[in-house]
Image (cartoon, helix red, strand yellow):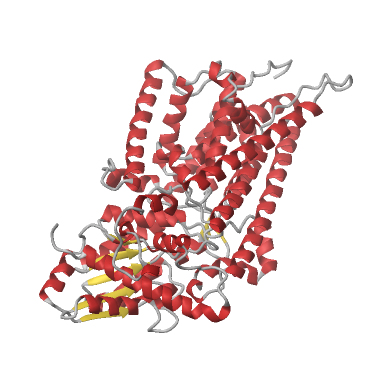
C-alpha cells in the first residue's frame, strides 16, 4: 500500500479496560486478599488475564500493523523485539526478587514441620542451573509465569503480522487450528527438569492474542471480520448477564455456604483449566468483550471523565505498570503476611498499591509527553503510540 | 480463583461472638473451622454401636511426622479413644514425605484398601503446590481419589495444606486450596481446613511458626500437632453425628 495512511484515532476503551485489568491482576495476585472477591473473576468464568492478553494482541496489531505499512517488515520486527527485550529484562528482574524472597523465607521457616514446603528452595541448591533456567524462561514459580507467555506471544508476532498482511483471516485460521489441536492432543510446553508445564500454555493462549490481533488489524484496514448487528450484541449481553449470575452465585456460595451455587456441578470444572484457556473461559471472555463493545461506545463521556483518567493512564503505560503491579503484589503480600492483616489493613494495602500504580503511570506519562515536545527537526516524525 | 478460603481477617469478626469448641485455650479454634455438615453417617453408626473403627491417614511429610508419636495422626487416635472409650479405634498412618496427590492415589490399592478402613483422612496438596503442577490435573486427581475411596465403602475427610506466613509469599497455594475446597464441596466430602486453622492460630498469637529458635523447633512441632490432632478429632466427631 502506498501513500499516507490516516492514523486510527486512539480508542480510549482499550486503555481503560487494560488499565482496569492491571488493577485486577494486582489485586488477584496478593494471596488471600479479600478484595479479590470484587474483581472480574467473581462475575465471569474468565479473569483479568484474558482481558489483558486480548487487548495486548489488539493493540500490538494496531501499532505494529501501522508500522509494517509505513516502515516495512524489518523495522516493525525490530520494534517488536525491542519490546520483547524490555519484557525479558523485567522477567529477570522479577526472578531476582523471587530468589531473594525464597532465600529469606527459608531462613525464617527452618522448622521440621515444613520439610515439603522447603522444597520451594530446591533451585538454590544448584544456582548455576537455576539462573540458566530462568534465562531460558524454563523456571516459572509463583508470579513468574505471566511474562514468559507475553514474551513468547510477542516474539512470534512478526509472523502473525506477515501472515495477516497476506490475508486478514490467515493467522486466525492457523491459530484456531493450533488451539484445537492443543486441546485435543494435550500439547504443552514442558519445564525441565521438573516435568511441569508452562502455567500459561502459549499454544493455547496464542489463540486469544491472535483473535485480538485480527480485531486490531481490522481497525486499520476497515474490514470487520466478526458478526455485527444489534441482535448479535444483545444476545452477547444476555449471555454475559447469565454468566455473571451463575458465577456470582458461586462467589456467594464460597463465602456464605447455604447460598446455592447455580450449575456448579455441570460448569465449574470446565472453568478451571486456565493453563489451556478452557473453551468456556474463552467463550465467557468473548461474549463479555462483545457486550462491552456494545455498551461502552468509544466516544462515551465517561471515558473522558476525571474518574476514568487514572485507569486510562495505567492502561497506556501497560508494560511498566504490569511489571510494577506484580512487584507491588509481592510487597503487599509480604506486608500482610508479616503484620497479620485484618480486613481494613488488606483494603489499605490494596489502595496504597493502586495509588502507587497510578502515581508511576502519571510520572511515565509526564515523561513521555515532555520528551516528545515538538522540536524543529523532529516535528515531522509522527509519534508512535505505545503498544 | 480464590473463592472459598475465607481470610481470617474476615473470620475473626465473624466468630468473635460465637462459642468455642472445647479445648485448652491456646489451641481452641472457631467453630466455623471445626463444624461441618453431618457427612460421616456410617462412622456415626459405628461409634454408636461400638464397632471397631479403622482410620487410615494418607498424606505427605506433615502427616508422616518425624517420629511415630509426634505427628497429628497419633494425637488424633488418642483424642478419639478418649471420646469413645468403648469403641476399639486404630489409626494407621500410611503417609510418605514428598508425595504428590497423584502418587498418593497410586498407593491407595496397596496402603488403603487392604486395611478396609471406615474412614480415610487424606491430607494432600503441599507438594503439588510447591512444584507448581497443573491445577486442573490436581483437581481431577482429587476427584478421582475421592471417588475411588468412596467406591471402597470408606468415608473420607480431606485435609488441606499447612499455613506459614513465610511460605505463602513464595508458594502459590491459593489455586490448589481452591481446587481442594471446591472438590470437597462438590463431592460432599468433609473438609478439614488446616490452612485456615493455622492461619487463625498464627494471627491470634497461639503459635508463632516463624523465627523459632533451633532448640524449640521439635517442641513446637509436637505441641502444634497435638492441637491439630485434637481439633481433627473434634471435626470428625462433629461430622459423625446422627441426624440433626
Residue B55: x and y in percent read 26, 75
Drawn side of residue A68 relative to residue B192, left or right:
right
Drawn side of residue A75 relative to residue B208, left or right:
right
Drawn side of residue A288 relative to residue A163, left or right:
left
User: In percent of the image, x 57 and y 51: which residue is there?
Assistant: A145
- Using the image as rendered, state which of residue A12 and residue A76 is in the foreground: A12
Residue B43: x and y in percent read 18, 69
In the displayed image of the protein, which residue is found farthest to the left? B49
Q: Name the quadrant containing residue A316.
A: top right
Tell me if residue A168 can be seen.
no
- Using the image as rendered, state which of residue A328 and residue A2 is in the foreground: A328
Residue A113: x and y in percent read 48, 73
User: In percent of the image, x 66 and y 34: which residue is there?
Assistant: A317
Tell me if residue A208 can be seen.
yes
Please, is residue A144 above or below residue B83 in the view? above
User: In percent of the image, x 73 and y 24: which residue is there?
Assistant: A70
Residue A85: x and y in percent read 72, 45
Please, is residue A372 above or below residue B12 in the view? above
Please, is residue A56 above or below residue B8 in the view? above
Q: Name the quadrant containing residue B64.
A: bottom left
Amino acid at each position: 500500500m502506498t501513500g499516507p495512511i490516516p492514523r486510527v484515532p486512539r480508542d480510549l476503551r482499550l486503555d481503560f479496560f487494560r488499565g482496569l485489568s492491571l488493577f485486577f491482576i494486582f489485586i488477584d495476585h496478593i494471596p488471600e486478599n479479600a478484595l479479590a472477591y470484587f474483581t472480574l473473576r467473581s462475575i465471569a468464568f474468565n479473569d483479568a488475564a484474558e482481558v489483558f492478553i486480548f487487548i495486548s494482541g489488539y493493540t500490538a496489531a494496531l501499532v505494529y500493523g501501522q508500522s509494517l505499512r509505513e516502515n516495512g517488515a524489518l523495522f516493525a520486527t525490530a520494534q517488536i523485539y525491542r519490546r520483547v527485550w524490555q519484557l525479558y529484562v523485567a522477567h529477570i528482574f522479577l526472578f531476582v526478587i523471587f530468589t531473594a524472597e525464597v532465600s529469606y523465607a527459608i531462613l525464617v521457616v527452618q522448622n521440621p514441620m515444613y520439610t515439603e514446603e522447603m522444597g520451594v528452595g530446591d533451585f538454590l541448591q544448584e544456582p548455576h542451573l537455576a539462573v540458566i533456567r530462568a534465562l531460558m524462561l524454563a523456571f516459572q514459580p509463583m508470579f513468574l509465569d505471566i511474562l514468559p507467555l507475553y514474551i513468547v506471544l510477542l516474539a512470534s508476532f512478526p509472523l502473525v503480522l506477515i501472515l495477516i498482511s497476506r490475508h486478514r483471516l490467515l493467522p486466525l485460521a492457523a491459530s484456531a487450528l493450533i488451539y484445537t489441536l492443543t486441546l485435543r492432543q494435550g500439547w504443552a510446553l514442558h519445564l525441565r527438569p521438573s516435568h511441569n508445564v508452562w502455567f500459561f500454555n502459549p499454544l493455547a493462549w496464542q489463540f486469544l492474542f491472535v483473535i485480538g490481533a485480527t480485531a486490531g488489524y481490522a481497525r486499520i484496514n476497515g474490514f470487520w471480520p466478526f458478526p455485527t448487528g444489534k441482535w448479535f450484541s444483545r444476545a452477547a449481553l444476555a449471555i454475559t448477564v447469565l454468566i455473571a449470575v451463575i458465577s456470582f452465585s458461586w462467589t456467594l456460595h464460597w463465602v456464605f455456604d447455604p447460598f446455592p451455587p447455580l450449575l456448579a456441578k455441570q460448569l465449574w470444572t470446565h472453568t478451571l483449566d486456565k493453563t489451556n484457556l478452557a473453551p468456556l473461559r474463552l467463550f465467557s471472555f468473548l461474549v463479555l468483550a462483545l457486550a462491552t463493545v456494545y455498551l461502552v461506545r468509544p466516544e462515551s463521556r465517561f471515558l473522558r471523565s476525571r474518574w476514568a483518567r487514572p485507569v486510562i493512564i495505567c492502561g497506556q503505560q501497560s508494560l511498566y505498570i504490569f511489571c510494577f503491579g506484580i512487584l507491588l503484589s509481592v510487597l503487599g503480600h509480604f506486608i500482610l503476611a508479616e503484620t497479620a492483616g485484618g480486613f481494613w489493613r488488606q483494603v489499605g494495602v490494596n489502595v496504597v498499591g493502586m495509588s502507587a500504580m497510578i502515581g508511576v503511570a502519571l510520572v511515565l506519562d509526564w515523561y513521555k509527553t515532555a520528551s516528545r515536545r515538538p522540536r524543529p527537526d523532529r516535528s515531522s516524525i509522527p509519534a508512535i503510540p505505545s503498544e | 480463583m480464590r473463592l472459598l478460603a475465607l481470610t481470617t481477617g474476615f473470620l475473626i469478626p465473624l466468630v468473635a461472638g460465637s462459642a468455642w469448641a472445647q479445648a485448652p485455650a491456646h489451641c481452641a479454634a472457631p467453630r466455623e473451622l471445626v463444624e461441618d455438615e453431618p457427612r460421616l453417617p456410617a462412622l456415626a453408626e459405628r461409634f454408636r454401636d461400638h464397632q471397631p473403627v479403622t482410620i487410615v491417614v494418607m498424606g505427605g511429610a506433615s502427616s508422616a511426622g518425624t517420629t511415630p508419636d509426634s505427628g497429628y495422626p497419633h494425637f488424633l487416635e488418642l483424642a478419639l479413644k478418649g471420646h469413645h472409650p468403648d469403641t476399639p479405634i486404630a489409626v494407621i498412618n500410611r503417609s510418605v514425605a514428598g508425595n504428590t496427590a497423584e502418587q498418593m492415589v497410586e498407593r491407595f490399592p496397596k496402603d488403603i484398601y487392604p486395611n478396609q478402613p471406615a474412614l480415610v483422612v487424606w491430607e494432600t496438596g503441599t507438594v503439588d503446590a510447591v512444584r507448581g503442577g497443573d491445577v486442573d490435573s490436581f483437581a481431577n486427581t482429587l476427584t478421582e481419589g475421592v471417588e475411588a475411596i468412596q467406591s471402597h465403602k470408606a468415608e473420607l475427610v480431606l485435609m488441606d495444606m499447612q499455613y506459614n506466613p513465610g511460605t505463602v509469599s513464595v508458594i502459590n497455594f491459593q489455586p490448589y486450596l481452591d481446587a481442594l475446597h471446591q472438590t470437597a464441596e462438590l463431592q460432599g466430602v468433609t473438609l478439614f481446613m488446616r490452612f485456615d486453622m493455622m492461619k487463625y492460630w498464627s494471627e491470634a498469637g497461639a503459635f508463632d511458626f516463624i523465627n523459632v529458635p533451633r532448640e524449640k523447633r521439635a517442641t513446637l512441632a509436637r505441641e502444634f500437632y497435638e492441637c491439630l490432632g485434637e481439633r481433627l478429632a473434634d471435626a470428625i466427631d462433629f461430622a459423625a453425628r446422627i441426624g440433626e
